[in-house]
Image (cartoon, rainbow, N blue to C red):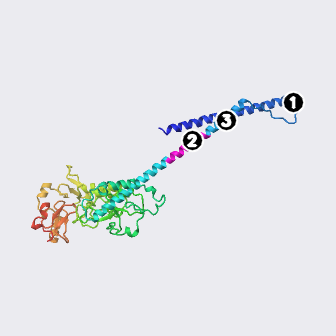
């Protein structure tokens, strides 16, 4: 509101000056018209008297006090107009100076924040190299100390290079204006990405640090995964690895409906070493907003129950409505009728109770052949989805595609007993 009032006053002054200037110009035109009319009248009078002047002299009315006053007023109006224009230009320049100062203050604050983050990351890296624990739960004040934070925030980064002797002054330890290449590649200073084998700056939230970084010449950011061996990766490689699981085609459409993505394991750890996979909190610190949309969308798809066509020539993913009163469902791929309660191809002339009461070997010729093949090849059915599983190599601990874990030897699915009973020695 304080800036609007001076602008209105200047506009009013300019408008008044313009109106007065127009009035003065109108008066001058009226005076010139009177002199012209007087000259024409004298010429007509001379012609009527029989005199023919060779040259008509312009008639001047003379300079009166009113004319002098008009000239003085006109000069004052022009001076006021020029003063108003000069005042408007000065006000515009002052506004630009204030805006420039505010922008410079914002840049200085962002640069100080970057310096604070850099020192915080350096201290955390030193603590990790020294084997200290619980460093992820610390904040900047507890790691750096109040004195260091006040020193960083009070330092005038814009004063570098100004004044005598400032060129030779060493930069503060928390602000590295130039990083030597041999220092950047030194494994003792920065962790090495397990994918691209390049050094990076470890930070708690690489995505946020990359968004607020104001220098492109610095190392890119990265983080440590909470896997058993705490593997480290830069944000580019880890982001690309997760997107290769969520969106293999790279067109933003995600995966196919048949694909089961989660858990997304560590690139260097096996699923047995880290079955939980990358958690949501780590994904939020690495992925963008669009990447998190794909993450949650795929996680929702993986949480839905999956049913597959029991036709051995199809096995396509089928959506079954278990709450519906209709026990039949149609496979959209092979058009086979499916019995929803029994999870088999529709059994004609038999109710579900009658079909389940039949021995497994007597249900259908196809079942007989399948059972014979299962016994001959020493295969086993998953106790949850009845999918046939083959043990090619490794231990007897089986994880089915429906994520059910069971013992291949006896089919037991009770987690507390899988590793406690002698029967479940998976190495046998």
The region drawn magenta spans 82-97
- Residue 162 against residue 9 in the figure, above or below: below
- Residue 141 against residue 70 in the figure, above or below: below
Q: In which quarter of the view is residue 196 placed?
A: bottom left
- Residue at image point 17% right, 71% down: 377
Q: Quadrant of the C terminus?
A: bottom left
Residue 88 is one of the magenta-drawn residues: yes
- Residues 320 and 260: in front is 260
Question: Which mark, by number, is residue 87?
Answer: 2
Question: Which mark, by number, is residue 397?
Answer: none
Residue 154 percent location from the top left of the image: 39, 53
Residue 42 is one of the magenta-drawn residues: no
For the residue labelled by badge 3, is the local secondary structure a helix, a strand or a loop? helix
In this rendering, does residue 247 appear at all? no
Q: In which quarter of the view is residue 195 placed?
A: bottom left
- Residue at image point 18% right, 69% down: 391
- Residue at image point 16% right, 61% down: 383
Circles 1, 2 touching at the beta carbon (< 8 Å) = no
Question: Which mark, by number, is residue 74?
Answer: 3
Which of marks 3 and 1 precedes in the sequence?
1
**How far apart are the two marked residues, 1 and 3, measured between alpha carbons?**
39 Å
Residue 362 percent location from the top left of the image: 12, 63
Which residue, as the protein is rendered here, is positioned at the far left?
Answer: 422
Residue 191 percent location from the top left of the image: 32, 66
- Residue 12 against residue 199 in the figure, above or below: above
Which residue, as the protein is rendered here, is positioned at the far right?
Answer: 50
The residue that label 1 is drawn on is 47
**Disc 1 residue crowd, few under 14, some 14–19, many 20+, Cα 10 Å:** few
User: Does 121 sit left or right of 310 as displayed?
Assistant: right
User: Does 378 sit left or right of 313 as displayed?
Assistant: left
């Amino acid at each position: 509101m304080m800036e609007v009032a001076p602008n209105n006053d200047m506009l009013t002054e300019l408008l008044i000056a313009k109106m007065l200037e127009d009035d003065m110009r109108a008066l001058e035109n009226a005076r010139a018209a009177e002199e012209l009319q007087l000259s024409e009248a004298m010429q007509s009078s001379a012609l009527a008297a029989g005199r023919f002047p060779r040259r008509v002299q312009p008639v001047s009315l003379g300079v009166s006090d009113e004319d002098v006053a008009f000239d003085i007023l006109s000069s004052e109006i022009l001076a006021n107009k020029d003063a108003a224009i000069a005042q408007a230009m000065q006000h515009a320049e002052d506004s630009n100076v204030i805006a420039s100062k505010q922008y410079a203050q914002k840049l200085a604050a962002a640069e100080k924040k970057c310096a604070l983050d850099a020192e915080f990351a350096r201290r955390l890296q030193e603590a990790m190299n020294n084997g200290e624990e619980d460093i992820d739960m610390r904040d900047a004040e507890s790691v750096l100390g109040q004195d260091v934070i006040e020193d960083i925030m009070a330092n005038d980064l814009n004063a570098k290079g100004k004044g005598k002797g400032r060129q030779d002054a060493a930069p503060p330890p928390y602000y590295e204006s130039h990083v030597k290449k041999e220092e950047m590649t030194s494994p003792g200073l920065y962790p090495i990405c397990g994918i691209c084998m390049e050094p990076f700056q470890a930070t708690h939230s690489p995505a946020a640090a990359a968004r607020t970084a104001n220098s492109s010449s610095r190392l890119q950011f990265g983080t440590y995964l909470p896997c058993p061996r705490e593997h480290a990766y830069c944000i580019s490689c880890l982001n690309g690895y997760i997107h290769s699981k969520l969106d293999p085609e790279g067109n933003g459409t995600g995966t196919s409906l048949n694909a089961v993505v989660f858990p997304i394991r560590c690139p260097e750890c096996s699923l047995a070493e880290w079955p939980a996979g990358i958690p949501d909190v780590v994904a939020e610190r690495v992925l963008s907003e669009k990447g998190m949309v794909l993450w949650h969308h795929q996680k929702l798809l993986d949480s839905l129950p999956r049913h597959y066509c029991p036709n051995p020539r199809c096995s396509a993913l089928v959506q079954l409505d278990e709450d519906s009163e209709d026990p039949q469902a149609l496979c959209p791929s092979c058009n086979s009728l499916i019995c929803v309660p029994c999870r088999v191809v529709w059994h004609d002339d038999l109710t579900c109770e009658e079909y389940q009461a039949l021995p497994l070997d007597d249900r259908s010729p196809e079942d007989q052949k399948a059972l014979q093949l299962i016994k001959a090849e020493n295969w086993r059915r998953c106790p949850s989805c009845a999918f046939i599983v083959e043990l090619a190599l490794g231990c007897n601990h089986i994880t089915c595609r429906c994520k059910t874990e069971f013992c291949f030897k006896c089919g037991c699915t009770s987690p507390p007993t899988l590793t406690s009973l002698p029967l479940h020695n998976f190495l046998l």
